Image: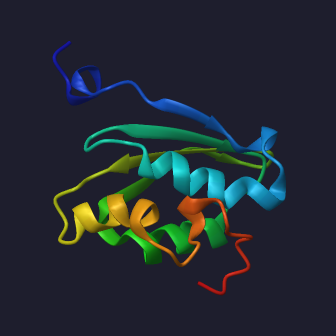
C-alpha cells in the first residue's frame, strides 16, 4: 500500500468545459501558476488540447509535466504536475505578477498565440 501514488498530494480539479473559451487559456495558466512544487492539477476537457499543451511546453519547459489519465472522444483528462527543479523555476512562477507585458497570468491575454 506504500506506493508513490498513495503518497502524492491529491490533484486539484480544473474542468475547462465550464470556462468561456476566450478566458480558458488564461484561467489554465493562472491555475498552473498557483500550484506549488509537487502539486497536480487534474484538467478535464471535451477535446484534446494540443495547442494548449504546446503553449504550456513553451511557457514552462520542464517545470510542468503532462500525463493523460483519459484520452477518448469527448473525455480528455490530463494531470499537470509542477516540478520546480528546472532552472528558471522561480522566475516562471513569479513572471505573471511582476510582468508588465500583460501575459496570460495577468488576465490580459486573449491567447491569440502572439506571445
67 w.r.t. 107: above or below: above
Q: Is residue 30 left or right of residue 23?
A: left
Instruction: Pick the residue in front: 109 or 99.
Output: 99
Q: Quadrant of residue 87?
A: bottom left
Q: Residue 95, position in %: x, y?
A: 39, 67
68 w.r.t. 14: above or below: below
Instruction: Give me the residue at 47% from left, 50% from top.
Output: 32
Q: How is the image coloured?
A: rainbow
Q: Is residue 93 left or right of residue 43?
A: left
- So how many labels did they put on this image? 0
Q: Quadrant of the C terminus?
A: bottom right
Q: Residue 39, position in %: x, y?
A: 34, 38
Q: Residue 69, position in %: x, y?
A: 52, 41
93 w.r.t. 11: above or below: below
Q: Residue 79, position in %: x, y?
A: 47, 44
Instruction: Pick the residue in front: 46 or 61.
Output: 61
Instruction: Give me the residue at 30% from left, 61% from top.
Output: 63
Residue 59 visible in the snapshot: yes
Q: Quadrant of the N terminus?
A: top left
Q: Is residue 75 left or right of residue 8?
A: right
Instruction: Give me the residue at 33% from left, 50% from top.
Output: 82
In this view, the residue farthest toward the top is 1
Residue 68 visible in the snapshot: no
30 w.r.t. 57: above or below: above
Instruction: Give me the residue at 64% from left, 51% from top.
Output: 27
Q: Is residue 72 left or right of residue 22?
A: left
Q: Quadrant of residue 57?
A: bottom left
Q: Quadrant of residue 10?
A: top left
Amino acid at each position: 500500500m506504500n506506493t508513490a501514488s498513495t503518497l502524492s498530494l491529491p490533484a486539484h480539479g480544473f474542468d475547462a468545459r465550464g470556462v468561456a473559451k476566450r478566458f480558458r487559456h488564461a484561467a489554465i495558466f493562472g491555475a498552473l501558476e498557483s500550484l506549488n512544487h509537487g502539486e497536480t492539477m487534474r484538467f478535464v476537457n471535451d477535446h484534446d488540447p494540443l495547442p494548449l499543451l504546446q503553449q504550456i511546453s513553451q511557457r514552462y519547459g520542464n517545470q510542468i509535466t503532462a500525463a493523460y489519465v483519459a484520452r477518448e472522444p469527448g473525455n480528455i483528462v490530463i494531470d499537470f504536475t509542477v516540478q520546480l527543479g528546472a532552472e528558471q523555476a522561480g522566475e516562471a512562477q513569479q513572471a505573471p505578477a511582476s510582468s508588465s507585458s500583460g501575459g496570460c497570468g495577468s488576465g490580459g491575454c486573449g491567447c491569440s498565440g502572439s506571445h
